[in-house]
Image (cartoon, coloured by chain):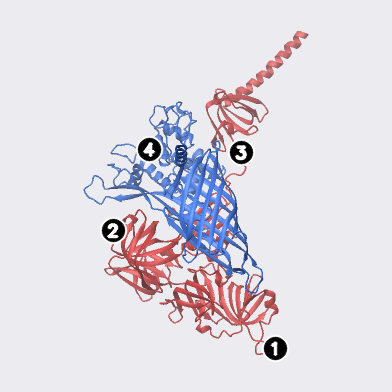
Chain colours: A red, B blue
Amino acid sequence: MLKKLVLLLIGFIFLLSGKAAAVENDILDLGHIEGYLMKVDRAENSEAKILIKTYGGNSYEFGVSPDAVFTIDDIPVMLEDFRVGMEIFSEIQNGEIVCMESYSTAVPGYISPASRVVTGVVKDFDEQQVLLQLTDGQEGIYYFSPATIIMKEGSNASLDILYEGDRVKLYFDEAGSHEVSQLKIEGDSILVRELYRGQLSGVDTVGKTIALQNVQVFRNGKWQEIQPLLQIPYIYELSLSVSGQKVPQHQLRYYQGNTVYLVTRELLGIQVAEKMAVKTYYEVAFTDEIDEINWFSRELETKNRVNLAFNSGTIVIKNGRLQDEYSLGSGDDAYIVADIWGSSRMANIVYVFNQDVNNSSVGEYGIYAGRLDQILQDRIRLDDCFVLDNNEWDSSSEEKELFYGSDTSIYDLEEGRFIDCREFYAGDYAVDGGSRWARYKDLEDYYAYVYANGNYIVSMNLQKEDIDSLGQQRASTGIFDSIENDFLVGWVASARDSCDWSSYKEQWLPRYDDLKLSLENAMIIKNNRVIMPEDLKTEDRFYMIRDDYSALIVIVK
Amino acid sequence: MKRLLLFIMTSVLISASVILFGNPAASAAPLDFTGGINDEYEYEEIVFLSGEPVKFVGTFEISERNRGEGKLLTYRFKLSPEDKNIDGLLDRRVTYEIIYTKRDDKGQTISRTELNSCREKIYIGDDLYSLSDYQFSKSDVIDNRPASDFYSGTLKARKYYDINKDEGKAVVEISGNTIGYENFWGSTETQLLDYFIDVDRQVPADEDEENPRTVSWQGIVKAEVSDSMNKSLQYSQNAADLSSFTGGYMRITAREMFSRYEYNLPQIEEGVAEDSKRIRGEVEINRRLLPQVERLVVPKFRDIGGHWAEEDINKLYSLDVFAGNSLFFVPDVPITRMEFTKAVINASDIRVSADKNGKSTQNGSADVRISPFVDVSIQDPDYLYVREALNKGIISGVAQGRFMPDEPLTRAQAITMLIRALGMENRAPTPGYCTSFTDDCQIPSWARDSIYVAREIGLIQGDAGNRVNPNKEVTRAEASSMLVRFLNFLQRDLQRNYREDIIFFS
């Protein structure tokens, strides 16, 4: 009986071990095993042992081939990178692991927010997207979302301050995404500082400087002599063109003795040459309006029926920025310098004067003037309202309703101070000057100059003086040369490279002298915020409405 | 005997320290933390202690002395106002001790900068500002990658000045960050510093007052200062026609410093600060050191004239990135894995040589007598390049302990080696993403991160069909083009990113 029992027991043990051996053989036959990593004997690879527990609950120990390949998330790793408890898949050959892989990443394809960056120059944009010329020469389209953050000079800004030709950095929160999470706009270093003309008299390729003699600067719409000799550094990527054709930078020295045009900007505290055009034979220079552009033949026709060719080597300056030829458009008023070659003319320089209240189609800013007819808690109604349309006051809108709020800047010119909304609402700013009550109270009508974003007022200046002089007012552009607080007359400024809008010619015409201005009664806007005269800087570019010497509304561009 | 001893001690001290006067090829880093800049000749900085910007210009000395695991850095300035109508003098001597803690396991170094000693006296007009205390703390982390070191640091400091001994105090609180990189082809350090100035002082009484008046004002100054050195290659054509060569390349080392101060100070009239009226402004200063020129050997290949990669090949040959004396470069045959490895090591200026004991000089712990690869013998003349590339993580070999030195290199392998040399592989997203190339599915898993990063940093582009062609063999000409782009990245892209991008977009 005992013998039988012992035999049964031995048989049972054999059966069990046979079953286990069969499972192990299955794994060896299959050539792979899946399960949990239970233990890694971290000896030298050749002697390392790995204990794996299958999903079925059986545990197996394997040796590791010296040539074994280990991966986690498809990335080659060392055996030491595996942790006990990981789910693994292993390939087995001759009882040794030859390949072992596992997965660990919690969020696949994740990048840190704003860690992907693209830098380029804006070629075109609207509220939804931006087309960039990238630093590697390619182009890319990227998309804005309502959550896109826009920054300029360290401050939050809006898309309407962006210009074509601006250099920007785009930040993305997701790998491969084209949705911009943050857009940073380069500051004033992008702006053209000067346009020079002179004879190229020296090239130092080691120090990267050029020397010009008989130097003239394009100032106040004409060439003015400044100094006999000018040495100026040029940037690493100096663009050189001859008759509109781009030529390699190393050919610069071959043009010594030629008259050249030089565009400079302020870079890291010094003025540097960025683009150069070489005058070849004869040239013609004139100011005219571009009437039509044929993009296929790359030719433009001016209002006075002058036909010119242009191409990628043509220096195009628009909105104070160096831009490519595609930024040109019909209606641009420009100073043009062209090489004459037989019967054809090739534009070397197209210097566009145009400025507007808005920098691009994205902006919805408008300027209004009128009598304050009614003031409610959140809105005003202007009577006899004029709107600035195409740089001229237009009276087509007789009454205009505009909204204001706590962030509207309101300045009472009569009292020379800012007032808040409540004071504005409670004050006698909307009276009918002809009424008996007004006469009895000795009240007068108030008139307002308003700068509004759509229908919302950003800023308004209030005055008692009637605005019947609107017809005399002018839209002007320019660059501040000096700003000072004069002891006698208050804040005054001088501006260069100014243009006035001619209603008769419907054209921007350059002024040939400096523009002197009083800023005492001016509403000054920069980056869509009201600033004070002391916040203005020399070299700030502006669009303004002025009444002769007195600046009324100044928008820093 | 006493004199002899003194002489010997002085000699030892002099030989142990190096006095530098603006060496263009030295690592770029602005002097001190005042926003000042210099060239070989003089130094300038703006001082705001009087309540208005006063530019001081003058001489400087830098001395550097190794001490244990770190070094002592001493700056000495003797400056006077640039505007001769202002009476003034600045005399400052400051010594910092920099202690490095190497973390070889992480390939990083932590540095700690401490103030060793400082004395400073500033005269502006009738006022003397003498430094009574200077608290300083700065630390940097340096990521030591094969082709370049990248670093970032933070500093905090406070300076206390006595005004005319007992007429008041000026406290300048300084905080800021330093960002930089350093490699053979260039180095840039940009400091972003904020100064908060708090002045509390007495001014003489008016005629109708009995006691001196106490005046206090606060000001804020932001300084962005950058020192940048880069080496560029430039071709110089021979002026003579009858020469054995038509021209050759030169390496130009240029160095430029820039500083921009942005200030917000009270308007001070007759010694009294009007807090309601503020003066805001900017001052920009720039200095360029004289470029250093180094002519390079002239390549004389017979088979690359007119080839699209001729310029790139000539550049690399001039730099000894490609070695050999053959008259034929053979640009259109595949480059081998060994040749490209050597080229990457040379382009990154990683020195490889064995000492007498057979140890690599770059990595003393590496025993070069045992080859890590069965197919690269230690007798191989290029063995040390392979060893160094392996030690630095640029290569890892192919399967089964082999390097396959004579096998053609694929584009995926080339890109991976370049990105590993830059140490930027980990800038890729977490695993489980696709690159934007149309042949993404053909990218080997080990090359995916590198190919993603290479496109992001502009090292590679797709072909006309937006393919990266990862498994295509790379010709010697294509390899030259990739290496020149790699050098441009080290020379120019990093400089632009660490200087222009930080300053222009901030």
- Labels 3 and 2 share a subunit: yes
Q: Residue at x 48, y 52 (%)?
A: B497
Q: Earlier in the sequence, mark 3 or mark 2?
A: 3
Viewer-nearest of labels 3 and 2? 2
Q: Quadrant of residue A371?
A: bottom right
- Asked if badges 3 and 4 are on one and the same chain, I answer no
Circle number at residue A254 = 2
Residue labelled with disc 3: A104
In front: label 1 or label 4: 1
Q: In which quadrant of the rendered image does the C terminus of chain B lie?
A: bottom right
- Marks 2 and 1 share the same chain: yes
Q: Which residue was labeled with disc 4?
A: B335
The one nearer the camera, B395 or A456, is B395
In the image, what residue type sits under mark 3?
Answer: Ser
- Which chain letter matches label 4? B
Residue lying furthest front: B1
Q: Name the residue rendered at 49%, 51% in the picture.
A: B76
Query: Is disc 4 placed on a helix, strand or loop?
Result: loop
SS at circle 1 = helix
